[in-house]
Image (cartoon, helix red, strand yellow):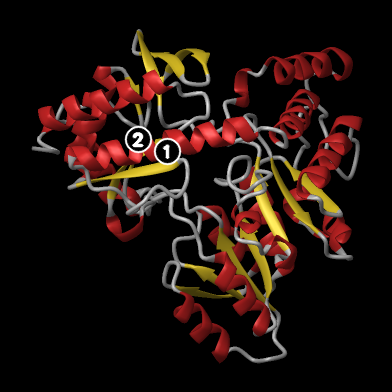
Amino acid sequence: MTDLFTKFDDLIKTREDLLSTGVTDPFNLVMEKVLSPTVAICNGRETILLGTYNYMGMTFDPDVIQAGKDALDNFGSGTTGSRVLNGTYAGHKACEEALRDFYDMDGAMVFSTGYLANLGVISTLAGKDDYIILDIDSHASIYDGCAMGNANVIPFRHNDIEALEKRLKRLPEDAGKLVILEGVYSMLGDVAPLDKMVPLAKKYGAMVLVDEAHSMGFIGENGRGVCEAQGVIDDVDFIIGTFSKSVGTVGGFCVSNHPKFEILRLVSRPYVFTASLPPSVVATAATSIGKLKHAKAKRDHLWENSKRLHGGLKKLGFQLGTEDPQSAIIAVIMPDLEKGAAMWEALLNEGLYVNLARPPATPANMTLLRCSLCALHSDEQVGEILGMFERAGRATGCID
């Protein structure tokens, strides 16, 4: 009998070799208690959180929490049904209205996760006779959406404008084409040149979908993401996002001005055949989105945090994923997985949690310590973080 796990043997060995060194399992950390958006109890000690995607610190906002409690009291714990059956409550419609208002767009659909939003929209829009042109560093949910729809997938080199045009030039003029980009790429925290890529896609007759999961809330004058910041939001056909980053809860969405957008509710399988979000979740999301619209002070502080941490780590001698700070994600490049795991554990022992990211999830087979800043990290905490990186870096030999 063929063991269906055989294909994972190399990964199993890599994991066993790593754990045999005595390092704490970096992919199985338990947060015993969360004290705030920036602090939790991990392994029995108070730990600064620098790897949670809680960019705008909305998880403990009093208005957001109260909205969730009220919805639990009034609507119960769940819908027990999909959106097209019994799973659309007043809160789901209110959440979609909050999204339409936030993005100033006509259409909004809420999915049960951000992953399902990409899966549902991409797989439904582009079928086997259509073409999807995407950045090679696209998120797994984007690739899975492409596979589910069975479209012809044509990747191009990361953030390479010329490579995108070469791919577009080769395609039949009358073919259905969808260009998929991300505002901020989650591994290195770098920003796409949407101001050049979106017009290029339109020139060759392609529709454009932009995933703004890691930029919604803090990039752009109103927090609408890189599309807004680079002045192309009105030219993009679909924006995908998630509630699990800046919004501070769980869920996903798509917004669009396309006049036929609403038909997706009846033809998108990951929307039709999935239970809808609990009333408490959409209530927290709608409340959070409403507050993010007026969160300029938070956005400004988050940018200051990003600039200070990026500059401080660079000065200490760490190799970073971007030359300049471009988002709330700062990636620290490690020599290899073993050294990365040692540095991760040293930081945890200092009282700092970051993400250890490894191949194949990372570009160019890099091992990264991925830092995700929060608008509620204080100036004092950023100073502490730099001190922790310096001590851990010297102890592990990652810096001189």
> Which element type, helix, strand or loop, lies under badge 1?
helix
Please indicate whether residue 358 sits to the left or right of residue 195 in the image. Answer: left
State the residue in front, 219 or 117: 219
Give the quadrant of residue 242: top right
State the residue in front, 57 or 116: 57
Give the percent coordinates (x, y) of residue 288.
71, 29
Label 2 with label 1: CB-CB less than 8 Å: yes
In the depicted structure, whether residue 209 falls above or below residue 308: below
Q: What residue is shown at x 38% (from left), y 42% (from top)?
A: 330
Give the percent coordinates (x, y) of residue 237.
74, 65
- Determine the CA span between mark 2 and mark 1: 5 Å
In the depicted structure, whether residue 28 falls above or below residue 182: above
State the residue in front, 295 or 235: 295
| Residue bearing mark 2 | 309
Q: What residue is shown at x 45% (from left), y 80% (from top)?
A: 163
| Residue bearing mark 1 | 306
Q: What residue is shown at x 64% (from left), y 45% (from top)?
A: 114
Give the quadrant of residue 307: top left
Residue type of the residue flagged with mark 1: Ser
> Which element type, helix, strand or loop, lies under badge 2?
helix
